[in-house]
Image (cartoon, rainbow, N blue to C red):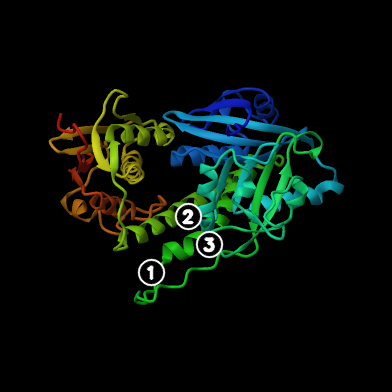
Amino acid sequence: MASEPIITARARTDADDNLIEAEEPLASFHLRAGGKLPGPIVTPALLELVRKARRSGKRLSRAIRAQDSQDRIATWVEVVPGRAGTIVNLSAWTVQDIPEPGRAADIDRLALVRHLAGLTARLDARQHLLAVDWTASDLDRVGEAMLTGVGQPWTDFVAIADNGGRSPVDWRMSDGARAEVSGSMRQWAVHLAPLGPGGTGSAGFELYLVPDQPLADDPPAPSRKPDRSAGIGRDIAPVLRQPVSRIIANAETIRSQLSGPLAEEYSNYAADIAAAGEHLLALIDDLTTLEMVEDEDFNPAPDHIDLADVARRAGGILGMRAKERGIILDFPKDAEKVPAIGEFRRTLQVLLNLVGNAIRYSPEGGQVWIRAVASGERAQVVVADQGEGLDADEQRRVFAKFERLGRSGDGGSGLGLYISRRLAEAMGGTLTVESARGQGARFTLDLPGGPDASG
């Protein structure tokens, strides 16, 4: 039977990423770090993970480190996104004294390992898998296998060099060893961080796989005609995403003044850096998706979905953004169901773009309506706003690539609606707009209806 991590503490956040409930010891740590209950999350690593889970709608887990004026803590965090925020589960909470200068090198080494790791896993005291997370694309195969094999020894999935195929009994035999991973041409170094009193691993381990070199770029396919723009998403995105993410994380650390007091103007400057980084990450994602939808071999994976449920999820994810501008989101009620055929992730992506635009262009204190309806053998979601609206010429241009209709300074790429229409069409649907100057806009996503859609 698979082992389960023992939950140390639970917490809950709202759609604004405020910590609204927290058990000990997280509650005391949060308060010592300058936070309030309820109030904004003040631990940057936790805030980053909560934001990522809420925006992606995916359950995420990883190890985080933080410190206040008294202690340096380490814990494994699992964030489960919900309709109105997230549930946070913490396990293996350990406390260390803030290291003296003589121990700083060991701490720095582990911090570097965490930064470079392509895969992170949480193990129990027997070195059996509890959870896994990875960022390296050449570890997709082993990462998926580990997720399926939770409860098994991690050595069932990673071949340690020169050990004759034996599973090590003592974790020290694996720490620092070289390893080969199925599906990856790179060599990997194994790093194990023991948890629990005295560093014995009595509370389990953190496993890190660190590559010996950066991931090589894929050579261009021989049949492909040379094109300066081809591969921009695939080639540039992996190179840019990690350093930009680090810039955002470091800027958030400075902005939150976790490392010490800071003049207000510098804190505001750090917030501007973080915001610019977020815009750049969004542009990177847009370019990656653009290349995907324009690939002649692109095919979504259609499935039976509930359009009303997808609409509710989009509204929940963007609730914080709407609240910041005093905008009310009116989305389908829990009991409403509208069966449709489409890929859940791509449909959610389209609705996030439509609802996000509606929030952006509605006046402060306004309202955005999201309606899901079945119409014969079709299923539809309508997103309506109270913005300035579009004239006939703007409606013809609004779905064009890089079209921003004269907008400037909002961080948009002009790709969102173009990509959304391509995704809708790839799923056998359409994306249309009805509008008039001064009367807002109504965007309609139309997809094939699912079973009982006409009833």
Viewer-proximal residue among 210 and 403: 210
In the visual, does 48 lie left or right of 127?
left
Whether residue 272 is visible to the viewer of this picture, yes or no, is no
Residue visible at 18% across and 43% down in the picture: 435
Q: For residue 433, what is the image quadrant?
A: top left
Provide the secondary structure element on which disc 3 rests. helix
Is tag 3's residue or tag 1's residue first in the polypeptide sequence? 1
Viewer-proximal residue among 298 and 72: 298
Is tag 2's residue or tag 3's residue first in the polypeptide sequence? 3
Q: List the residue tagged with mark 3.
A: 239
- Mark identifier at residue 230: 1
- Mark identifier at residue 280: 2
Provide the secondary structure element on which disc 1 rests. loop
Q: For residue 369, what is the image quadrant?
A: top left
Q: How far apart are marks 3 and 1 (CA)?
A: 16 Å
Kindly check if marks 3 and 1 are in contact, taking CB atoms under 8 A apart as contact. no
Q: What residue type is labelled 2?
A: Leu
Residue 310 location, x and y as percent? 33, 36
Q: How far apart are marks 2 and 3 (CA)?
A: 13 Å
Residue visible at 36% across and 36% down in the picture: 314
In the visual, does 284 lie left or right of 12?
left
The local crowd at label 2, few if under 14, some if 14 to 19, many if 20 or more residues have their Cα within 10 Å, is: some
Residue visible at 12% across and 36% down in the picture: 376
Residue 107 location, x and y as percent? 77, 47
Residue positioned most to the right: 102
Whether residue 396 is visible to the viewer of this picture, yes or no, is yes
Q: For residue 205, what is the image quadrant?
A: top right
Task: Give the position of the N terminus as an image quadrant.
Answer: top right
Q: What residue type is labelled 3?
A: Val
